[in-house]
Image: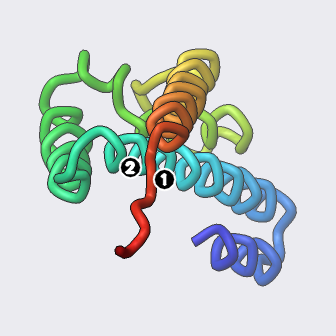
């Protein structure tokens, strides 16, 4: 996804559009790493990581964050948009997380997910065939 966003950035002509596309490239890259880290952490904690990830994405990100503004502080989508909004010129007005809150949330997900996944995978043992 980040590659297609970078190609779009190169195709655009105006400097302001290039800066906006660069901001979206950064946001896509950060968001992809955060979601991937979260899903890997879920996969070592539960055997139903796909269902938990889809439930988070559909229920929390899609439904609850749309109707309950207070839940946006725990939304990776809002954190990604906060990073994009801080880097790009003001193209749109939004009432989501600011840059500091976005970096803190993404940092918690990245570091927490990494620590959970590495500690669980360090204890994982592969059994050999008899």
Residue 63, located in which quarter of the rendered image? top left
Residue at 35% in and 74% down: 130
Q: Residues within 10 Å of mark 2 (few under 14, many from 20)?
A: some
Res. 120 mark? none
One can see residue 93 in this view: no
* Residue bearing mark 1: 36
- What kind of element bears circle 1? helix
Residue at 68% in and 59% down: 25
One can see residue 30 in this view: yes
Residue 101, located in which quarter of the rendered image? top right
Say if mark 1 contacts mark 2, CB within 8 Å: yes
Query: Can you say whether 4 is above or below 41 in the image?
Result: below
Query: Can you say whether 101 is above or below 40 in the image?
Result: above
Q: Residue furthest front?
A: 130
Residue at 64% in and 55% down: 29
Distance from the alpha carbon under mark 1 to that under mark 2: 5 Å
Query: Can you say whether 130 is above or below 96 in the image?
Result: below
* Residue bearing mark 2: 39
Residue at 13% in and 32% down: 67
Query: Can you say whether 32 is above or below 56 in the image?
Result: below
- What kind of element bears circle 2? helix
For the residue pair 61 and 32, the one nearer the viewer reads as 32
Residue 46, located in which quarter of the rendered image? top left
For the residue pair 87 and 36, the one nearer the viewer reads as 36
The N terminus sits in image quarter: bottom right
Q: Residue furthest right?
A: 15
- Left or right: where 1 falls relative to 128: right
Counting from the top left corner in percent of width and height, residue 84 is at 62, 42
Counting from the top left corner in percent of width and height, residue 6 is at 74, 72
Q: Residues within 10 Å of mark 1 (few under 14, many from 20)?
A: some
Colour scheme used in the picture?
rainbow
């Amino acid at each position: 996804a980040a590659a297609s966003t970078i190609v779009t950035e190169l195709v655009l002509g105006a400097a302001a559009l290039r800066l906006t596309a660069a901001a979206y490239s950064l946001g896509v890259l950060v968001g992809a790493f955060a979601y991937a880290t979260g899903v890997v952490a879920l996969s070592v904690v539960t055997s139903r990581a796909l269902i938990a990830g889809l439930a988070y994405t559909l229920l929390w990100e899609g439904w609850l964050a749309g109707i309950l503004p207070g839940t946006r502080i725990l939304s990776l989508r809002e954190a990604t948009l906060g990073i994009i909004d801080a880097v790009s010129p003001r193209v749109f007005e939004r009432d989501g997380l600011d840059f500091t809150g976005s970096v803190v949330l993404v940092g918690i997900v990245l570091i927490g997910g990494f620590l959970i996944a590495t500690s669980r995978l360090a204890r994982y043992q592969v059994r050999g065939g008899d």
